[in-house]
Image (spheres, rainbow, N blue to C red):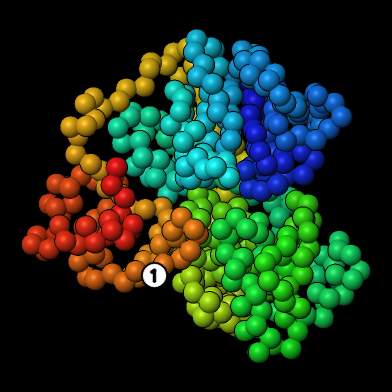
Amino acid sequence: MKISFLDDEPEIFPNQYGGKARTIINLAKEFKKMPEVEEVTILSRSITHKEKEFYLGGIKFKKLNDYSIIRDILDEASKTDILNIHNCSFTTPLLTGLNCKIIYHLHDVIYATSDAGSHLDKALGNNWSQIIAPSSFAANVLKSIAWWSDLRNKISVIPRGINKDIFYNLEKIKALKLLSPSLAKKIAQSYPVIFFPQRSSAGKGEEFLVPLSKLLLKEFKAPLILVPGGIKGKSKIIINTHWVKTNDLKAFYSLSDLSLVLSKLPETFSQSTLESIACETPVIAFRYGNLNGLSKNLPLIYIAEPTLDNVYKQIKIALNDPNHKIKSKKSLKVIDKKYNLQIIAKNLLKIYKSSLKNKELLISKQVKQIHKQEPRLFLSPNVAIYINKAYVVNEKKEILVQLLNNNEQELLKLIKSPSTLDQLYSGFNQKNNFNKNLQSLINKKIIIRV
């Protein structure tokens, strides 16, 4: 079997910039070990190398650029068995009549924007052999958006994996040796050391860092916050580590007392969360997207409400938790069992084998006379629910808190999949208050009507 990966951004070689790039490289290496896999190829616009084609570790890399991209994709689709699509900016052309199986990998549930790539709209734009979602959260959002198409029946949930050869707890002395002498000295003299392994200016919660630094300085003698990129505002305890190479990330995680994953985005997975936990470092996170799901199985995640005071409260709880070792051990067991790369690669191989070839696919069916269909309602992916509070992220990436009455809370519990008005009404106890409370949730942008 020949397996190919098509990627467009951000950087995948020689550095892996972000979770998507690391996922592709990890899977490529794992597939290369399998006896039934003959060849593995990675095609990308983000490969920096003097040669257009080259091999590394037995994996073939092929640079894509300019108007030849289309021809390169056509050539690869004509000679490979599996074409994995990981595009967020480039739109894969609709291909028909080919022997290969074209698999789409969903990495975010954001629609196309003017300033950033996106995956949700790309998932709706082709007749895929199969769609792989990294979490139930991501799968549910896609199914909600695509309620009108049988494309929703092709979605499988396969989580991303963690490379335990790269991410593990590193002894402090060894970790410090991987850093510059000045940074190593600074970290060795600091407590608590907090790592913010996120891109700045990308809705990842970097605006909390400067206010947090002021709170830390009131309580601790030598706190330190490490950020791999510049942020707005200044603080003497916030250090820009600049871009950290994948192989060096374990040093930063291992030397830190905790990590902050304060994303306000509807995270479909959150690679940095698992990487931190693999290095036995606790994580403070919000409930947006899959972070809520991860927290239910990984005790090293401390869920905070997206407010400064609550984030700081959870930081102190995590730093003083007497059960750290027990939680760490339980979390590592979950990672070994659920996010094992070998198991994930085998599960993907099963999907590859059971999927239809491109030439065998019928044109995807959709609901006829859509304008006569009842609207579907589903929970907005841009909302984090905390019992009687909903924190909604608006278009400006601002967090707005909305209080929920008992009826609104009941309605939200009923929406587990895209639902019609009749379906919600039949399960709602307070019939007389149904329309009022539903409209309230829609107005607050907690429920979406499509």
Q: Badge 1: few (under 14), some or many (20 or more) residues near its Cα, within 10 Å?
A: some
Amino acid residing under circle 1:
Val
Residue 111 to residue 427: above or below: above
Q: Say if residue 283 shows up in the picture.
A: no
- Residue depicted at 30% across the width and 25% down the height: 366
Where's residue 321, x and y in %?
Answer: 57, 80
- Residue depicted at 58% across the width and 44% down the height: 116
Residue placed furthest toward the right: 181
Q: Secondary structure at mark 1?
A: strand
The quadrant of the image that shows the C terminus is top left
Work out whether residue 260 or residue 110 is closer to the camera in this orientation and state it. Answer: 110
Q: Which residue is mark 1?
A: 401
**263 relative to 167 in the view: left or right:** left
Residue 377 to residue 124: above or below: below
Where's residue 111, x and y in %?
Answer: 47, 42
Where's residue 257, x and y in %?
Answer: 68, 74
Residue 257 to residue 54: above or below: below
- Residue depicted at 44% across the width and 23% down the height: 127
The quadrant of the image that shows the N terminus is top right
Where's residue 395, x and y in %?
Answer: 46, 55
- Residue depicted at 46% across the width and 72% down the height: 305
Work out whether residue 198 or residue 343 is closer to the camera in this orientation and state it. Answer: 198
Residue placed furthest toward the left: 432
Q: Say if residue 326 shows up in the picture.
A: yes
**77 relative to 179 in the view: left or right:** left
Q: Quadrant of residue 90?
A: top right
Disc count in the image?
A: 1
